[in-house]
C-alpha cells in the first residue's frame, strides 16, 4: 500500500466513526496534535489542583473540606488517566512533565488567576467545571479511543464538581449581604476568564480545521462558547446574581444570547506565561516534582524488588 492508501484508510475509518487505537496506522501530524492536546489537558488538571488545593484547610466546615478534598483528588486522577492516554501515543510521562516545567507545554489559561475568597470555590465549580464539561462531553466522542474512553469517567466526575460549585454559590446567594456580595464578586472575576477557556475565536484558531476533519474536535471553540453563555444566562437567574456583561441580550434571529467582546490581549498575555499566577503555578509544580523524587525512587525500587521476587 502507498502512503496515500494508508491516509485514505485512516480518514475512511474516522469518517465511519471507527475509533483509532494505539497500534493503528495514523498520520504523524494526528499523533502530534493528540499528544499536544491530551498532554495540555493533563497538565491543566494537575495545575488546576493548585488554586483549589489552596482552600482545603480554609473551607468553612468539615463537610466542605471533605467535598473539596475529594474534588481535588478527582482532578489528580483525571491528570493520570490523561497522561496514560498520551503515553499510548509513544511519548513518555517524563518528557511531558519536562515540557510543562520548562514552559514549552501549555495548560489552560484559567488556572493562572488567583482564588481570593471561599466564593471562588463555588465560581470555579460552576463556571470553570461547567465550561470544561461542555468541552469534554464533546471529547467523549473524539476519534482516538484511549482519549475518548478516559473522557467518559472524567465527565461523570466533572458533573459532580459543577454541582458542588453551584451549591456553594446558591448557599452564599441566600446568605447575609456580605455573603451575597462575595458571591457576586467571584462571578464577576471568573466570568470572562471562563469564556477564554474555549480558546481563540474560530477565525484565529490554528488547530481547529484539521482537528475537526480528524474528529478530534466535534464542535468549534465559538460554538461551545455560545452554548456556555446560553446555559449560564439561565443558571445565574436561579442564583439571583448577574453576569458582568452589559452587552448580554437575547438575539431572536440567531436564537442565542449576544455577548460582549472578550479581552483577547489579556487571553494571549496569560497563554504566553504573563498572567497573574503563571510563575507561582509553575514554581509550585516544579517544587512538588523535586520534593517527590524520593517517592518515585522508592516506588520504583519496590516494584523492582517485587519483580525480582516473582521471577
Ligand atoms: N489556555 O487552535 P486552538 C479542568 C492555545 S481542566 C491556554 O483553538 P485547539 C479542570 C492552544 O493550545 C480542562 N492555551 O487550539 C481542572 C493553541 O496553542 P498550541 C482543560 C490555549 O487545541 C481543575 C492556541 O492557543 N480542558 O477541567 O484546537 C479544576 C490556538 O488555539 C487555550 C482541556 O484542556 C486556553 N484556554 O483548541 C477545574 C480540553 N485555548 O497548542 C477544572 C482539551 C487555546 O498550538 N483541549 N489555547 O501551541 C481542547 O479541547 C483544546 O485544546 C482547546 C483549544 C479547546 C482548549
Image: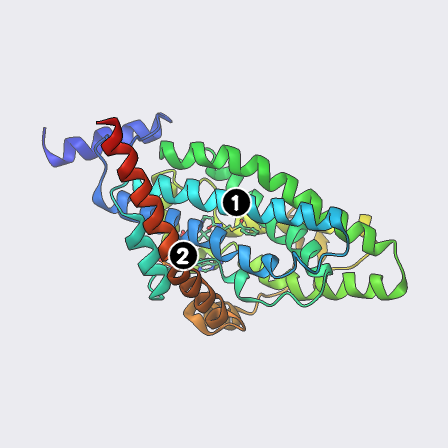
Q: Do the residues labelled 1 and 2 touch (CB within 8 Å)?
A: no
Q: Which of marks 1 and 2 is nearer the N terminus?
A: 1
Q: Is mark 2 within 8 Å of ligand 1?
A: no
Color encoding of the figure: rainbow
Left or right of 224? Residue 65 is right
* 260 or 177, nearer to the observer: 177
Residue shown at 33% from the left, 63% from the top: 104
Identify the element where label 2 is drawn: loop
Q: Is mark 1 within 8 Å of ligand 1?
A: yes
Residue 243: where, in percent of width, then height?
A: 73, 60
Q: Is residue 185 something one can see in this rendering?
A: yes
Q: Is residue 231 something one can see in this rendering?
A: no
Residue shown at 21% from the left, 33% from the top: 25
**Residue 305 picture quarter:** top left
C-alpha span from label 1 to label 2? 32 Å
Left or right of 267? Residue 209 is left
Seen as rendered, the residue at the extreme right is: 176
**Ligand 1 positioned in quadrant:** bottom left
Residue shown at 80% from the left, 50% from the top: 170
Question: Crowding near pointer 1: few (<14 within 10 Å), some, many (20+)?
Answer: many
The quarter of the picture where the C terminus appears is top left
* 36 or 93, nearer to the observer: 93
Q: Mark 2 points at which residue?
A: 292
The quarter of the picture where the N terminus appears is top left
**Residue 255 picture quarter:** top right
Residue shown at 61% from the left, 57% from the top: 52
Question: Crowding near pointer 2: few (<14 within 10 Å), some, many (20+)?
Answer: few
User: For the image shown, how many numbered marks are present on the structure?
Assistant: 2
Identify the element where label 1 is drawn: helix
The circle drawn on residue 135 is 1
Residue 253: where, in percent of width, then height?
A: 67, 48
In the image, is residue 4 above or below residue 125? above
Amino acid at each position: 500500500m502507498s502512503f496515500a492508501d494508508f491516509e485514505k484508510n485512516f480518514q475512511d475509518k474516522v469518517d465511519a466513526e471507527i475509533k483509532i487505537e494505539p497500534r493503528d496506522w495514523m498520520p504523524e501530524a494526528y499523533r502530534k496534535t493528540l499528544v499536544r492536546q491530551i498532554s495540555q489537558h493533563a497538565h491543566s488538571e494537575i495545575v488546576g489542583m493548585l488554586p483549589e488545593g489552596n482552600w482545603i484547610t480554609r473551607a468553612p466546615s468539615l463537610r466542605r473540606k471533605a467535598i473539596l478534598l475529594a474534588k481535588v483528588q478527582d482532578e489528580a486522577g483525571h491528570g493520570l488517566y490523561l497522561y496514560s492516554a498520551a503515553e499510548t501515543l509513544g511519548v513518555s510521562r517524563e518528557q511531558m512533565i519536562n515540557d510543562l516545567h520548562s514552559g514549552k507545554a501549555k495548560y489552560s489559561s484559567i488556572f493562572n488567576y488567583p482564588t481570593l475568597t471561599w466564593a471562588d470555590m463555588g465560581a470555579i465549580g460552576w463556571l470553570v467545571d461547567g465550561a470544561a464539561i461542555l468541552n469534554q462531553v464533546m471529547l467523549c466522542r473524539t476519534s482516538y479511543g484511549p482519549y475518548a474512553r478516559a473522557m467518559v469517567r472524567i465527565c461523570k466526575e466533572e458533573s459532580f464538581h459543577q454541582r458542588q460549585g453551584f451549591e456553594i454559590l446558591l448557599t452564599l446567594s441566600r446568605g447575609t449581604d456580605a455573603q451575597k456580595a462575595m458571591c457576586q464578586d467571584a462571578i464577576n472575576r471568573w466570568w470572562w476568564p471562563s469564556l477564554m477557556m474555549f480558546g481563540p475565536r474560530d477565525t484565529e484558531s490554528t488547530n481547529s480545521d484539521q482537528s475537526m476533519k480528524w474528529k478530534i474536535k466535534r464542535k468549534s471553540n465559538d460554538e461551545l462558547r455560545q452554548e456556555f453563555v446560553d446555559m449560564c444566562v439561565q443558571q445565574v437567574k436561579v442564583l439571583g446574581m448577574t453576569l458582568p456583561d452589559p452587552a448580554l441580550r437575547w438575539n431572536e434571529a440567531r436564537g442565542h444570547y449576544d455577548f460582549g467582546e472578550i479581552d483577547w490581549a489579556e487571553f494571549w498575555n496569560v497563554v504566553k506565561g504573563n498572567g497573574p499566577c503563571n510563575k507561582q503555578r509553575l514554581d509550585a509544580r516544579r517544587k512538588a516534582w523535586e520534593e517527590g523524587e524520593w517517592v518515585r525512587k522508592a516506588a520504583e525500587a519496590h516494584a523492582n524488588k517485587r519483580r525480582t521476587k516473582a521471577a
